[in-house]
Amino acid sequence: MYPLHRHFRGSRRCLILALVLTAPLAAQQNTPATPTPASPIRLTLEDALQRARRNSVTYQAAVTDAGIAHEDKKQAIAGLLPSVNYNNSAIYTDSNGVNGNVKFIANNAVHEYISQGNVHEALDVAGFAEARRASATAAAVRARQEIAARGLVVTVVQSYYTAAAAEKKLEAAQKAADEGERFLKLTQDLEHGGEVAHSDVIKGELQVNERRRQLQEAKLTLLNARLDLAVLVFPEFNDTFELAEDLHANPSLPTLPEVETRASRENPDIRAALEAANAAAHGVAAARAAYLPSLGLDYFYGIDATRFATRTDGISNLGSSAVVTLNIPVWNWGATQSKVKQAELRRDQAKRELSLVQRKLLAELKSLYSEAQTAAEELSNLQRSAELGTESLRLVLLRYKNGESTVLEVVDAQNVAFSSDAAFQDGAVRYRVALANLQTLTGVLTTP
């Protein structure tokens, strides 16, 4: 027994040792791994535009309208083509009791079974005019879809570059805050050396507080700008993205003749108004077609017999017939004349709207191009002003250290440097938005 007892005791020690050694490994295996944060999406302007097209309710509504109009066009064209139907019916009629004849003369027998195919075609001028009208309407709705797409471009471009400018402004605010801290430290050191008065320290501290406030406001502005862009771009809330486009990689402005040529050829507003005028003209033709006769053609093949069978007593029940119907309008109490009058009123209004769109295009072309041209010219001046403001601040600080300038001059230089940099960022956004507005006329988004 003793050896057996020692054997069990040794086994228990080995088991405890094994549990102690394997416990850390098991704990490590059972401990859930810390999830690594997802890398931010690198969002280019083109990516933002594509995502916004998928997520924009307004743009998708325009796409839906275009799809519906396209199906209306297909239905109108299909209405001009022959249709095929297969009709099945059974007629049970009361007999008059004489030789199996029926009481109703319109019916052929007491039991009559009809199973036949029908090829139908209707020929009238109104059908062709309606098909042309539906085609023009579909083209007009497609042009309105393009208008919605270009309007979305302006919104996305403005939101995208506003967020990019907010990032630049935050960097400038952080730089200004750091500069204010250094200047406060400088005034304190100079005061300890007896070189400046305590009023300079007070002014430096006031300036630091102002810079800290501006830094907080810049952070809030950037947050709101990113949220506005995220709402446009992402179907779900997502603010883990970074902007890939350089705000200051400014594309060149196309020449005015080039813009005029593109606008005359690619402007969707004119195309929509023109197609709407064409649709209204075809609507007049369709209304006037009601004065004209219409022709109907029907061909039947199948069974029209007293038994539901292809043959009865060795005789085939299959047969065919054709019907030609000519409908001649005579009198409808002026309803057709009223419809023609309505169509003519719509046509005249569509012509007036087309003329208005053409005049507005000329005015908008000059206005938007002048806006882009002015923004481009001012942008170079704003950039130069930002560079001069930075250089001026550096020189004033050097003079202050040497006792050659006052604290008021330093504060003024700091304010000028900060405001000129912010104006430069706003000018870059203005130029980008002006180019996007030109796209609403030309259909071409100018990129670097």
Image: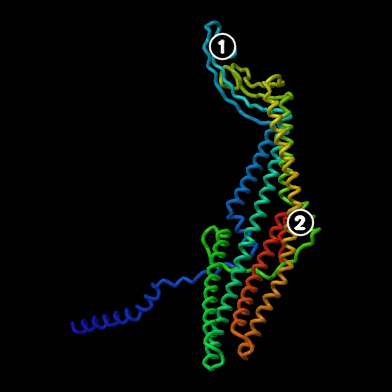
- Disc 2 marks which amino acid? Lys
Mark 1–mark 2 contact, CB under 8 Å? no
The quarter holding residue 421 reads: bottom right
**In the rendered view, would you say 150 is above or below 28?**
above
Which residue is pictured at 38% across the width and 72% down the height? 30
Q: Nearer the viewer, residue 299 or 215?
A: 215
Q: Quadrant of the C terminus?
A: bottom right
Find disc 2 in the rendering and name its residue: 366
- Disc 1 marks which amino acid? Phe
Residue at the bottom extreme, as displayed? 193
Q: Nearer the viewer, residue 61 or 353?
A: 353
Give the image location of residue 424, x and y in percent. Answer: 66, 71
Find disc 1 in the rendering and name its residue: 104
1 vs 2, front mark: 2
Q: Earlier in the sequence, mark 1 or mark 2?
A: 1
The quarter holding residue 321 reads: top right
Q: CA distance from mark 1 to mark 2?
A: 79 Å
Q: Is residue 125 shown left or right of residue 106?
A: right
The quarter holding residue 103 reads: top right
Check disc 2 and report its element: helix, strand or loop.
helix
Which residue is pictured at 63% across the width and 24% down the height? 302
**In the rendered view, would you say 410 is above or below 237?**
below
Q: Quadrant of the N terminus?
A: bottom left
Give the image location of residue 26, x and y in percent. Answer: 37, 75
Give the image location of residue 74, x and y in percent. Answer: 67, 39
